[in-house]
Image: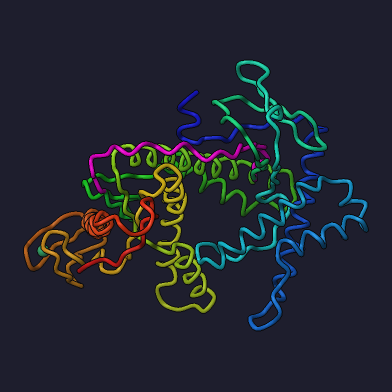
Amino acid sequence: MLIGSLIGVSRYRLQPSPAQEQALLEHCGHARYVWNLAVEQHAHWKPGRRSAPGFAEQCRQLTEARAESAWLRAGSVIVQQQALKDFAQAMSTFFGGSHRRPAWRKQGRGEGFRIVAAKAGDVRRLSRHVGEVRVPKVGWVRFRWSRAVPEGVKSYRVTRDRAGRWHVAFAAIPEPVPAPGLGEVVGVDRGVAVSAALSTGEMLHAPGLHDTEKARLRRLLRKLARATRGSNRHAKVKAAVARLKARESDRRKDWVEKISTDLAQRFDVIAVEDLRIRAMTRSARGTVEVPGRKVRAKAGLNRGILAAGWGGLVRRLEDKAPGRVVRVSPVYTSQRCSACGIVDRVARESQARYRCRSCGYACNADVNAARNIAHAAGHAVSAREGPRDAGPEHREPQPVLLSV
Ligand SMILES: [Zn+2]
């Protein structure tokens, strides 16, 4: 029971009856419709114009729309309002620079909706492996009770993946993991060749597909290219591709849960580079549109970064080690020698090797970067532990510049 809530894994396979599935699809359709209306409204907005309607104004417009449309009115107002809330959230992460601009949603892709204000009795267990959740306008829908359900569920999200599988995810922020209290700082470098390198010298690899699965995926993609669109065969191959991709993403999610718990248990301070992953992927796409040199290489790099699941790892670390994650400026982390401190632009022999021409120190380039990140965070932490006469004691760690 404890482990489930501790690591915050909360996704369960939903098993709707055919009739329930129709009703769930109707909710998805309403959520998508409302989301796309919001995207449209904001698409016409340009800097300098009167601001596009915010959440409150959009909710008012939704009430009007429901009065006029029997189709919308028949659906759940919670589902529709939450789609607007999701959109508002997506806009704020877009303006914050961490995510892409919210885009138009297509049918059959990333479908889902959120239910809030769930009551204590809305989730119950029927037997050892079966539970059910009450979905407005749908009724009790069964799900596989594959792990403990978090206590006090207030909201949940229902999703349908590209393979047509339904899931329910109960929102529960994982219990913070207690700090070990030994004053240990770890630096984590988000490598591409290696998924993560620690300043301790450990290398962490995010799992992907096995070689045989990769070969199968390549075969399926070739088949898909040859199949006629809209044919039965095309749909079958497409579903098989989606299942493989879902398997890969499940493995990555499990890995993120495991690693984030492990780091939060072993170290008091976890230092990561303050990389704007989304900004990087966006700039590469921009270059694809205006083709130039290095476009292919950059696209490959971006795939690597996304495959490593960075954003997810940092978010989970912040959930499990609140106030103990320090973001460090990435300037020089790959060029600075973690042994003598000199900054040497050509010291990086290759993607994998760092060799300092000044003191002769040599090690894996990602580990060298991780050690620099830990070093910078260490400075920030000791500065914070100075006199405690001003300000509240539990301040969030501030991002710091790397001292060189
Ligand atoms: Zn050196």
Q: Position of residue 24 (x, y in %)?
A: 77, 40
Q: Is residue 360 magenta?
A: no
Q: Position of residue 259 (x, y in %)?
A: 37, 40
Foreground: 385 or 216? Answer: 385
Foreground: 150 or 351? Answer: 150
Q: Please name the residue shown 76% across and 62% down the image.
A: 58
Q: What's the magenta region?
A: 162-185
Q: Residue extending furthest top?
A: 127
Residue 352 visible at all: no
Magenta stretch mostly in which secondary structure? loop
Q: Is residue 166 magenta?
A: yes
Q: Is residue 347 left or right of residue 392?
A: left
Q: In which quarter of the view is residue 92 placed?
A: bottom right
Residue 91 visible at all: yes
Q: Please name the residue shown 65% across and 40% down the image.
A: 155
Q: In which quarter of the view is residue 340 placed?
A: bottom left
Ligand number 1: quarter of image = bottom left
Q: Please name the residue shown 27% across and 46% down the image.
A: 203
Q: Residue extending furthest front?
A: 389
For the image shown, how many numbered marks are present on the structure? 0
Foreground: 199 or 214? Answer: 199
Q: Residue extending furthest bottom?
A: 48
Q: Position of residue 318 (x, y in %)?
A: 43, 48
User: Which quadrant of the rendered structure holds the C terminus?
Assistant: bottom left
Q: Is residue 137 left or right of residue 150?
A: right
Q: Please name the residue shown 35% across and 41% down the image.
A: 264
Q: In which quarter of the view is residue 101 placed?
A: bottom right
Q: Position of residue 132 (x, y in %)?
A: 70, 26
